[in-house]
Image: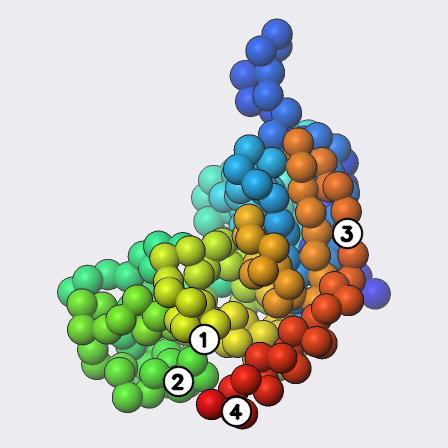
Amino acid sequence: MEHLIKVMDLCKIYNPGENEVRALDHVNLEIDRGEFVAIIGQSGSGKSTFMNMLGCLDIPTSGKYYLNGTDVSTMSDNELSLVRNKEIGFIFQGFNLIPNLTAVENVELPLIYRGIDKKERRKLATEALEMVGLSHRIHHKPSEMSGGQQQRVAIARAIAAKPPVILADEPTGNLDSASSKEILNILKNLHKDGRTVILITHDDGIAARAKRVVRIMDGKIESDRINPEYEKVEEVHEDKDSEE
């Protein structure tokens, strides 16, 4: 089976020469369709650089990156922009919503760039907002919503076009614990629905919500394992939910 993501011998070097920094040092990784993977690392580990590579926001110094069967490691900025729009749904720590647009208009925005007609855009945007529990907020602007609700709009925007990859970069970083739990449950449900979710985090507790945990340190993959606590974590949270 062809891997959705295949990274081969990937390097990213800043300041080549005597004072070079190897942000990524011969990284190899494969992610299959439908996986829920956390990539965890502390500040300076190379995790953010790796996220930029996986998200086609930057290109490597050397090595190969195949996304959905296409080598994207040597593409131009314009080509990468097209790939990002088609293949990847981004969820960032900052919600990056347009203040003067309503929730549904924010979700529709990337669909406009994809050339989807107005009627279909509204349908896809509304369905995505329903999936994250915001059907009652579609005409509200960001300032009229809580942080957790704004992040749910951002998730709806990421999933509306049904991209192959959902890339979530510290998606709970600006949220309280209750909102964080809501967002992680949404990501878990997206995975259960067959989406491929990649979660970038520095927090072991957040990484424990993913089924597979890849730890990066000093630009190298230190460990790559199936999370033995995955089912237990789900059960604990679901039991708590039922008690509440």
Q: Is residue 111 above or below residue 127?
A: above
Asked if one can make out residue 117 in the rendered structure from this viewpoint, the answer is: no
Q: CA distance from mark 3 to mark 1?
A: 26 Å
Q: Are marks 3 and 1 in contact (CB under 8 Å)?
A: no
Say whether disc 1 or disc 2 marks the residue closer to the N-terminus: 2
Q: Which mark is residue 133?
A: 2
User: How far apart are the alpha carbons under marks 1 and 2?
Assistant: 10 Å
Instruction: Count up the numbered dots.
Output: 4
- Kindly report the distance in space between the C-alpha atoms of the residues bearing marks 2 and 3: 33 Å
- At 21% from the left and 81% from the top, the residue drawn is 139
In terms of secondary structure, where does tag 3 sit?
A: strand
Q: Is residue 81 above or below residue 240?
A: above
Amino acid type, label 4: Glu
Q: The N terminus is located in which quarter? A: bottom right
- Per the image, the residue denoted by label 4 is 243
Q: Decide which of tag 3 and tag 4 comes sooner along the chain.
A: 3
Mark 2 falls on what kind of element? loop
- List x then y, in percent, for residue 38: 63, 57
Give the x, y percent position of residue 213: 70, 57
Choose mark 2 or mark 4, whichever is in front.
4
**Label at residue 182:** 1
